[in-house]
Image (cartoon, rainbow, N blue to C red):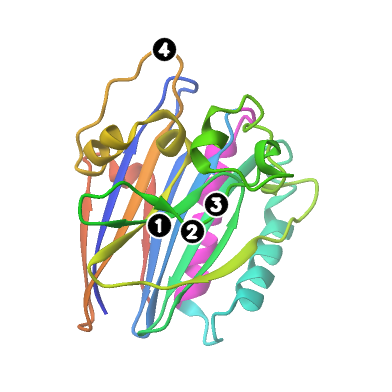
Amino acid sequence: MKMQLDWRSQRGTKTGDNRDYGGVGIRPDGVLCLVLDGATSGPKSGELAGQIARDVIDWYVATADDVTAETLTAQLRKIHGSLSKQFPRDTASYVIVCLAGTGPALVLHAGDCLLGRRVGKSPLQWLIRPHTLANVIDDIPVAAIAESHVRHRLTRSFRAREFMPPNAAEIKAERGSSLIAATDGFWTELTSEEQAMFMQGQFPPMIGEADDRSVLAIELLDNEQDIEFCFNEDRSENFYIGRP
């Protein structure tokens, strides 16, 4: 499959480091993309997000197993076992998108990273819901979740205390549209117009206390095996690429 991956990331003002992380693993038979958001509360949550990305991608490009919700969850559980003692006070949200051939995309997520779809210049359509106290009872729109004062309280994430299995879904990947994986700084703090600007590399100014903002756009082009990348200048700091 031929696709274009656009990674845009902007450090916020809440911490001295950008705690968002993205990555892609590339195999002859498919591609795995992921976006992670390390919590501002943990001292090394950004490092945790980066290590999860590297561990998942390194496993993906090396394994001969079929990548299913079960095998990917099992690997996340294994990674949790190796990282929980190293990062006892840190947490991260994530969304993982696995694409193979012409079938639907396998999506696993935990926390407040989201996956959406964009067709042309239309506003984003969010395809999953975050795991927060704001929507733990009612399935309210993402726009309403963004305005809730309890959305920062996550009901599921990658945390040391216990392994919390992600939610899994299959989502149709349509040519002519883009799948958009984003951290909460992107979908809660930016308007639709600002989101479109951000994805073009035009970053709106940070006003007051602002979160890290990151987005990975995944556009399927045709059936050829080729991947094109587009990044902002500091992408090497928080984006990992793995190949066999």
Instruction: Judge the density around disc 3: few (<14), some (14-19), many (≥20) Cα neighbours within 10 Å.
Output: many
Residue at 28% in and 32% down? 194
Residue at 55% in and 39% down? 38
Can you identify the residue that label 2 sits on? 54
Quadrant (top left, top right, bottom left, bottom right) of the N terminus: bottom left
Label at residue 23: 1
Between the C-alphas of marks 2 and 4, the distance is 32 Å
Can you identify the residue that label 4 sits on? 208
Q: Which of marks 2 and 1 is in front?
A: 1
Kindly state the secondary structure of the residue where label 3 is placed.
strand
The secondary structure that dominates the magenta segment is helix
**Magenta residue check for 46:** yes
Can you identify the residue that label 3 sits on? 94
Q: Are marks 4 and 1 in contact (CB under 8 Å)?
A: no
Residue found farthest to the top: 208
* 35 with respect to 40 (left or right): left
Q: Do the residues labelled 2 and 1 touch (CB within 8 Å)?
A: yes
Q: Nearer the viewer, mark 2 or mark 4?
A: 4
